[in-house]
Image (cartoon, rainbow, N blue to C red):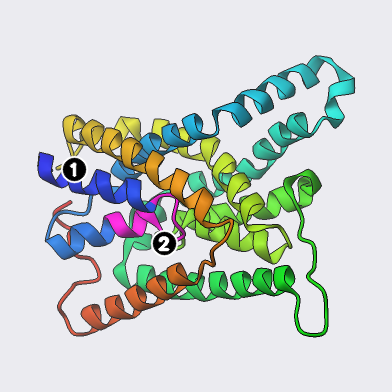
Amino acid sequence: MSWFESFVLGLVQGLTEFLPISSSAHLRLTAAFAGWHDPGAAFTAITQIGTEAAVLIYFRKDIVRIVSAWFRSLVDRSMRGDHDARMGWLVIVGSIPIGVLGVTFKDQIEGPFRDLRLIATTLIVMGIVLGFADRLAARDESGGRHRAGKERKTLKELGVKDGLIFGFCQAMALIPGVSRSGATISGGLLMGYTREAAARYSFLLAIPAVLASGVFELKDAGEGHVSWGPTIFATFIAFGVGYAVIAWFMKFITTKSFMPFVAYRIILGILLFILVGAGVLSPHAGESAG
């Protein structure tokens, strides 16, 4: 991998990690369209450490408060009903599904799941799911001609059951094209949470999963065509761009719909099917060389 490739892929990672359009799919597609080798699951996981560092800084006050309350709850029973202490436990509970499924399906994640036809399918299907969930949330918020708006849930109402459902939604993102934020936000909206609550828990829930995945994949960094230098460079690029994107996205979702992302996913998925069907792109483009 050249330094230019690592710059472009780091930029793509930072731009797409927090948007509901799938960063892993876009890394895969960028390489395929450019005629580069597939950067691989290890490169993706490690560069995601950069974007998660952006999450740690952006949500630093929330994280410090949650971690502090969680540790205090271990020795002080009176703290166990505290909202921040509960959030600490709920992040742990919600991280279990992706941990188990990530290890179980590691070979598939690094191989068959990176087929461009599967990515096109997940882009379209999850786009439709996100669109439905978004419309449901909009209907609840605005009400209608003959009914008042319905109040949606906040994170104070989050429990173990919903935390696990969020966790299983996050685990779906092991398949490129699904999108970690897209799946968890869709799940949250379908369970009746506000856009802001679903997005906030989605980003907090991603921290242990992404950091663990990145550390786990460190042993594979530098193998094949991807060397350590470009990987680290791409990770720093992803951090800088990712911080700007998450700040923008958290403001965007308070007043805007997810429909632009829905349309983008569906159009990209259809275009990908056309290109593969016409023989312009191989469904395994770049894999043999990678």
The quarter of the picture where residue 24 lies is bottom left
Q: Position of residue 40 (x, y in %)?
A: 27, 49
* Disc 2 target residue: 21
> For this rendering, which residue is in front, 100 or 93?
93
Q: Position of residue 156 (x, y in %)?
A: 78, 44
Relative horizontal placement of residue 25, taking residue 191 as reference (left or right): left
- Secondary structure, mark 1, is helix
* Disc 1 target residue: 7
Q: Is residue 41 visible?
A: no
Q: Magenta residues, as a range?
A: 17-27
* Mark 2 surroundings within 10 Å by alpha-carbon count, few (fewer than 14), some (14 through 19), many (20 or more): many
> For this rendering, which residue is in front, 281 or 76?
76
Q: Position of residue 234 (x, y in %)?
A: 24, 38
Vertical comparison of 177 with 93: above or below: below
Q: Position of residue 38 (x, y in %)?
A: 22, 54
The residue drawn where x is 44% and y is 56% is 19
Q: What amino acid type is highlighted by mark number 2? A: Ile
The residue drawn where x is 75% and y is 75% is 143
Q: What amino acid type is highlighted by mark number 1? A: Phe
Q: Is residue 21 magenta?
A: yes
Query: Spatial distance from mark 2 to mark 1, Cα to Cα?
Result: 20 Å
Vertical comparison of 270 with 155: above or below: below
Q: State the mark number for residue 58.
A: none
Relative horizontal placement of residue 238, taking residue 85 as reference (left or right): left
